[in-house]
Structure formats: C-alpha cells, structure tokens
Amino acid sequence: MSKWEKIVAISAAAMVFGTTAYAESVSNWDLPSKTAVESVKIENKILMTTSKLQWNADQLKLFQDHDVNRQFFPALLYKVNQFDDLRSKLMFTNAPGAKFTRKLATDADGEEIKLSILNINELNKDKTYEFYTAWLHTVEGDSQVSFRSLQRYAQPNGTLNDLVKTDDEIATIKFKDAEETDKKYRDYYLPNSFDNPFQQYTWQDEANTAKEKSYALINSKDKLESYKLGAARNLKFATGGNKVKFAITFKNNAMIRPDELVKTYNLTLSQIYAAGIKENEEEYTVSWYDTGLEVMTLMRPKQTEFVKFYFTELEGTAYVEDLQKMSKEPYVDVIEIESNGKQVPTGVHWLNKLYGN
C-alpha cells in the first residue's frame, strides 16, 4: 500500500496523510482524491505548512470545461483558528493559474489564505500539486490551522464567488506538533517589519469588501489582447487625483525591483507575485506582501529547484496619474484598475502564459 493510501499520524514529522473517499455523489468534486499535509517550525516564531494533493480523472471531468459560462474551479484554504495567532508571510504553489487571497484576521476570526486555481483545463490527473505558506507565530502557546477545500465560480464579466456550503475540512495543523528544525530564527535574516506587531496589516486601512475580477470571458489570444488594449484605454482616460486599486502585469523576465517602484510611483502594495521556473519548465507561483522580505529565505529548500525567478505582478493602490506614468515603462505589459470599486483586478500573467503572449 502506498503512502497516499494510508491514514497515518506521525507526531515527530507532524504529517497527516489521507485518502478521500470519492462517492457517487458529485457534490465534492473540489475535495482532492489524495492529500498529504506537513508542517515545520522555526523556534516559536515561524510555522511552515505544506499541503500536497491530487485530483483524479473522474473529478477533473466534473469541472474542466471550456464554456465561458461554466467556469467552476476548486480552491484551497488555510484558516487560522484564533484571530491573533498567525500571520501569513509567503505562499507558493505549482497549481496553474494560481491566485492567492488573504482575508485579514478580525477580533472574532483568524486569518485566511485562499488559493484559487483559475486555469482549470491545465490541471492534470494524479499530478501532485503543492500549496505552501510560511507564517509568523505571534503567541507563546499553541496555534491551529485548518486546511480546507471549496468550490468557486468565475462569473462571466463579473467576479469570483464562493459556492455556499462547499467548504470541507481536510486536516488540522497544530503548531505544537510541527517538526522542529535545527535552524534558528536569526539564521533567516528577516527584516524588522517581519515580526513587528504594528507592521502586520499596515497597507490596509479598512476592510476590503470588493471582489476579485473574473477573467472567464478571455478564452483566446485575440480576446486577451483586446482586453489589455481596453485596460490601457481605461487607465489613459481615468480621472487624475483619484486613488484606485490596481494590478500591474510585467513582461516576462522583467528586471524590476518592487521597492524602487514603490518609491518612484508612490505605490501602496498589497501583494507581490513572482514566478519560479524549474529545470523542467514547470512554473511555481510565489506571492508575498513585504518589499523588504528576502523571499528565498522562507522557501528553503524549494528555491534550490528554480533555474529562473522573476517578478510577474503587483497589486495595491495608487493615484491614477502615477499609474499613467508607469504604464509607459518598457517592462510593463498592462496596468488594470478597478471597475467602480466592485471588480478588483488581479493581473493576467497566467493568461499570458496560457495563450503565449
């Protein structure tokens, strides 16, 4: 019997293995057919959670579809049990068309990190996909993270939406059970802002009620180019003096530094995206928030597998006139701005990759 088919609890390695019983009911097509979850901790300061999962051929048939009106897709979620226990710092995955969404902790609920897998038709049966998150542990005692799956829908010309009552728990990760390494916190050379209690959510002044933009109607190279031209026009003729939410997509292998762009164009960043390319050309989507973070330190040993690493997208807020200036830079592919405060763009790097742009 393979490790995927066993149900094992190994306290020393803090690993949970399981096999999902996929019944005749098709209601749980998002729930991976095989999962393995492991966790590692650095002293009492950092928790690293890695989930490995697969979907089988029968499951993929239930949601893979080229019809723009039927864009259902699986999502994965790390949900912290207590509001002040853990703060996400960096995520990566090899799932295609990956987008990460962070729901901030409140007085009642812990932080959530949601991975939406938008490029559903590139998912392969029985291939192992990873979902990794590095967390700052902010309390002295134990903390718990629930790993979950759910179903989402990309509304044509609308937003991304959760399907109600599709949320299923796969595993619970406990900080006290995580494998201890011989590395020390000081070995990671993290910036002072990393664990400063006053610099965890500095970019967001108020709750974000807007939803992520859906790109479901873009199903060809021509439609992608048409969309980007339209986004460029929207920015060009937008009224100056207004601060707007944006998504900047860079051209492939762009040589940029987010910290310098922040200073030059007065950007307030909420999310940074990069691509890590392995020797077999498989792409990992990497995302974090802090321009001062040395991301490779939180990716050990995964970073040793990358032969290329470059920035792909930035999300945040800025004044229209600053974005208009930045749009003329040769490394910029397209800058999208929010639509009436209801549809927040998240970038089109994954669509560029899909259609060879």
Image: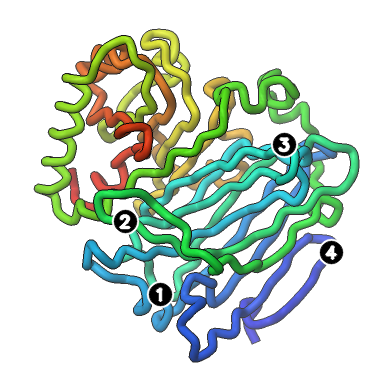
234 to the left or right of 318: left
Tally of marks: 4
Which residue position is annotated with label 4? Answer: 11
Q: Which amino acid does label 1 sit on?
A: Lys
Provide the secondary structure element on which disc 3 rests.
strand
Q: Are marks 4 and 1 in contact (CB under 8 Å)?
A: no
Q: Where is residue 62 in the image (x, y as percent from the top left)?
A: 37, 78
Label 4 neighbour load within 10 Å: few <14, some 14-19, many 20+: few
Disc 3 residue type (three-letter): Leu
Q: Residue 125: which numbered mark, if any?
A: 1
Residue at 39% x, 38% y is 308
Q: Which amino acid type is marked by label 4?
A: Ser
Q: Residue at x 63, y 27 (%)?
A: 201
**Disc 4 to disc 3, C-alpha distance:** 21 Å
User: Tag on residue 155?
Assistant: 2
Instruction: Choose between 351 and 85: the one closer to the eye.
Output: 85
Residue 181 coordinates in the image, percent (x, y): 79, 46
Residue ID for mark 3: 136
Of the residues tagged 1 and 2, which is closer to the observer? 2
Quadrant hosting residue 169: bottom right
In what element is the residue under mark 4?
loop
